[in-house]
Amino acid sequence: MRYTGELPRSRYTWKEIPGSSHDILLSRITALGEGLSVLDVGFGAGHLARRIRTRCRYLAGIELDPDAAREGAGFFDDPLVDDVISGLAGPWREPFDVIVAGDILEHLPEPGLALDRLRPLLKPGGLLLVSLPNVANVTVRFGLLLGRFPLSDRGILDRTHLRFFTRRTGRELLVQHGFAVLGETPTAMPVELALPSLGRPPLAGPVRTIARLLAAIWPGMFGYQIVYEARPA
């Protein structure tokens, strides 16, 4: 049985936006220093891997899509082409300091099963980094008020998402599967992706600042994604 669909990972590009989930995940790993052992679950074309490669003593990854995996595999010591559940069995050379599940659990029929299987892969004191889209975002709420729940090719209502999470239910999922949540960081809505004119000067700075401020003040409403930091309880 395959535990995730045939995800076209190549369309999930790296978001070069300050305060995006990719930016936050990268900054959290960078802050841990060097000589790390890291597992990247759903590594796609290796966008994160190529940015952290020099910090890693051992870098492993799992990716379902073979075309995306071929593009990113060269950055890994152990790149595995498999679905998440099967892939977590390894084999891996050692336990991990950090496991990253960025924008992946929402694609799984049983995200809790994945968490159960990755928890013992962490070293004592190891860190799990998870990003999940926030289905309670104001844009989705407004659409529901209008009787709309439009699926799309990407974003919160990506049609390949099998599970939907709010800030609270994402935290509850981690706790229910044996993790203590250390921190939650909401990301700002990437309005410049929907309206490119807002991503250019002179509007880019003020728009990004306002979006980040709203997400910080009211994460459940204006957070686009939530990045969780957790350790085995």
Image: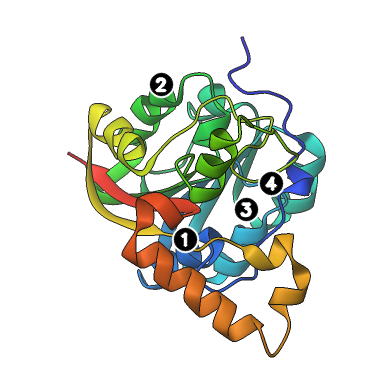
Disc 4: CA contacts within 10 A as few (<14), some (14-19) or many (>=20)? many
Residue 153 x/y as whole percent:
75, 40
Q: Are the residues flagged by discs 4 and 1 in contact, CB closer than 8 Å?
A: no
Residue found at x 54% / y 66%:
52
In the picture as drawn, the residue positioned furthest to the left comes out as: 233
Name the residue tied to disc 4.
44
Nearest-to-viewer mark from 3 and 4: 4
Work out whether residue 98 can be spotted: no
Q: Amino acid at mark 2?
A: Leu
Residue 48 x/y as whole percent:
60, 60
First reached walking from the N terminus: tag 2 or tag 4: 4
Name the residue tied to disc 1.
187
First reached walking from the N terminus: tag 3 or tag 2: 3
Question: What is the quadrant of the C terminus in the image?
Answer: top left
Nearest-to-viewer mark from 1 and 2: 1
Q: Are the residues flagged by discs 3 and 4 in contact, CB closer than 8 Å?
A: no
Rendered position, 151 above or below 228: above
Residue 34 x/y as whole percent:
41, 71
Name the residue tied to disc 2.
113
Q: CA distance from mark 4 to mark 1?
A: 21 Å
Disc 2: CA contacts within 10 A as few (<14), some (14-19) or many (>=20)? some
Rendered position, 66 above or below 100: above
First reached walking from the N terminus: tag 3 or tag 4: 4
Quarter-wise, where is residue 35 in the image?
bottom left
